[in-house]
Image (cartoon, rainbow, N blue to C red):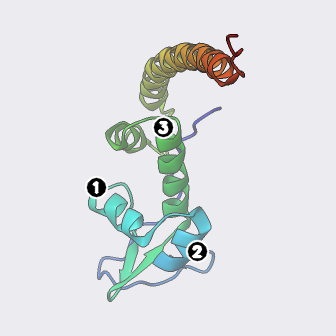
Amino acid sequence: MTMTFNQAGAAAPANDAVVPEADEEYARIGEMAKMFDVTLRTLRFYEDKGLLSPKRDGSTRLYTRRDRARLKLILLGRKIGFSLRDVKQIMDLYDPSGANTKQLRLTMDKSEKQLARLQKQRAAIDDAIAELSDMMTAVRRMLAERSAPTAVAS
């Protein structure tokens, strides 16, 4: 799985009025929530943490293509176990006019560490499954022995 951290999007006008560009599609908060199967609270939380920056039209949040790309990356990062802080650090290093080598190095470093953590967790889970399976086999055997009809002594 490759993580690409591009953020295409236009700057908001200086007067904070929302002026849709001809090719820009905006999504309201409810549409974003449905599109990505997240709650409205989640979207507001990511905004509070500085991960998303929807445009505003009064109290209405309008999400751009850039916000959709960022949310997709946030959710991918969370799925693979990155903290929100890690995701933000990686996304904040994006430079649309640069080679982004610093961002890519940070992504590799965090990915290698997370992969090692996940492999360690998988080994622990495999051990727990084996132990549980062994215990269940022993309990089944004990139940079978204790449930078997006992011979009547004459």
Residue on which the image places disc 3: 98
Residue 149: image x %, image y %? 72, 22
**Residue furthest top as drawn:** 154
Compute the Cα span from label 2 to label 3.
24 Å
Judging by the rendered image, the residue that carries numbered circle 2 is 24
**In percent of the image, x 58 and y 74: which residue is there?**
24
Q: Earlier in the sequence, mark 1 or mark 3?
A: 1
Disc 1 from disc 2: Cα separation = 24 Å
What amino acid type is highlighted by mark number 3?
Gly
Quadrant in which the C terminus appears: top right
Residue tagged 1: 49
- Pointer 1 with pointer 2, Cβ within 8 A: no
Residue occupying image coordinates x 63% and y 75%: 23
Q: Residue furthest bottom?
A: 58
Measured Cα–Cα span from mark 1 to mark 3: 25 Å
Instruction: Kindly tell me whether residue 87 is visible in this rendering.
Output: yes
In the picture, measured across the screen, residue 90 lies left or right of residue 49, that is right
As drawn, 151 above or below 21: above
Callout 2, which amino acid? Glu
Q: Which badge, 1 or 2, is on the more N-terminal residue?
A: 2
Task: Report the residue at 32% width, 89% height from top.
Answer: 58
* Residue 3 point in image, percent of width and height: 57, 36
Left or right, residue 38 beside residue 49:
right
Q: What secondary structure is found at the residue carrying circle 1?
A: loop
Q: Residue at (59%, 76%) from the top-left corner?
A: 25
